[in-house]
Image (tube, grey):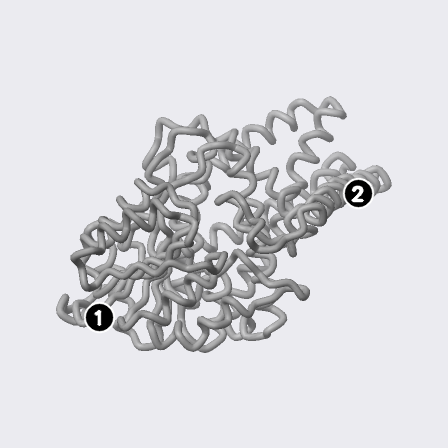
Amino acid sequence: MAPGVLTYLPIALIGVWRWSVWLGKLCVALLYSPYTATEEQEVNEFDVSVVVPVYRPDVDTFMAAVRSWMATDPYEMIAVIDEGDTEAIRRFRGFAEDKDDVSCVVTPKPGKRPALVDGAKLTSGDVIALVDDDVRWRADTKREFLKPFLESTIGAVSPKQEVNQQITVPQKLYEIQMRLQFAIDYPALSHLSRSLSCVSGRTAVYRRTALLPVIDGLTEETFLGKNVISGDDKHLTRAIQASGWDAVYQSTSVIDIGAVPDAGRFFGQTVRWTRNTIRSDIKAFSEGWIFERRWLAYYNLDRFVGTFAILMAPLYFSLSLAQSMFVISGAILIWWFVSRSFKMSPFLYKYPKQIYYVPLYTLSSFLRSPIYLYALYSANTQGWLTRGDDSRFGFDRLRQKAVTTFSVVLAVITVVGYIYLLLLVKYEAA
């Protein structure tokens, strides 16, 4: 076999592997169907308690969300509002003034986790929906997310998310991520193993008997000796599945979510979510229960390995340019465009005129590896990054900055070392 062919054999094999996995997920996702109810009366028998933790919200957005939840006629609504959010307290109390089924709890405790615990313990409904303060429901959101609970083994349900405002590039990239995730990953896992990597906290719906036995764990969770602040949805998803309950996806229950408009906050949010995933995956494998749900275990492992394998693509593209192999360079560019367009088909089907986002999304996918490395090295950094000041959690600011700087340096060293080793192997083989 010619040396030139051998040079590009590794990336070809990796491409076959990644495409095999993706096509497998796609085939399983196509077999998915949402849960249905033969009698609507069966669904109406569930009492739904809505619990919303409120911390530094956009008050107008929060109140619009409140009205959307109330329009679905829940059994009760409990808002646990941080004591510093005086305008939110005033507006919500005014809304709740003549309503017996709406409660306002003002809390001095910092953080989302204590608010969720306190709110959940005050509920009396059969089903508890934990909802972010900026999420809007549609007219049939509640009715649809109740249908899976007709099966007694189901303890948690994740609705479908759609970004309601897509003006800036970060908002559009987030919509692409959500569109692909809820078109392929969630239905595939739900159909194949009745399990999920995360029942997103945007609207996480739990059976009361599944949630309350594990809710205290939210404020007790630690990682490497530190209390965990974010990632409450990951923790609860892990806890209820470890207890033997199934977690499923319901595509017919749709919620409208917001997205941060600027690149800085989008990056911070991505890092925070990646840290949450890293911590949760480590805990799931160390606890052992995930091996009983082998497809979920495989999904998490494949996601981890794939994050680093994707670095091979830009490396080989750079090599082809450096060696003046412009035909190969052009072929790689064309392949990227065609393959990413195909993988983005759930998004492009709805927005066919926005195919110009394919190159940008391709570039963002290559950036996930260094972001993952940075998140990995700083996995024990805690905070609620999209809501501003974290000083009330008692963090040492100097230590946080030192960890951040050190993590960036380690991420850069790792990427450079990774590329160096690949080049070393390549030239030794040549």
Is label 2 in a helix, a strand or a loop? Answer: helix
Specify the quadrant of the image occupied by residue 101.
bottom left
Q: Residues within 10 Å of mark 1 (few under 14, many from 20)?
A: some
Is label 1 in a helix, a strand or a loop? Answer: loop
The reply to whether callout 2 and callout 1 are in contact (CB within 8 Å) is: no
Q: Is residue 291 visible?
A: yes
Q: Tell which circle, 2 or 1, labels the residue nearer the N-terminal end.
A: 1
* Residue 18 image offset from top left, x and y in percent: 57, 49
Residue tagged 1? 46
Left or right of 391, for residue 248: left
Q: Residue at x 56, y 62 (%)?
A: 280
Instruction: Looking at the picture, tell me which residue is in the foreground, 69 or 93.
Output: 93
Instruction: Looking at the picture, tell me which residue is in the foreground, 121 or 323.
Output: 121
Q: State the mark number for residue 417.
A: 2
Of the 4 image quadrants, the one containing the C terminus is top right
Q: State the mark number for residue 265.
A: none
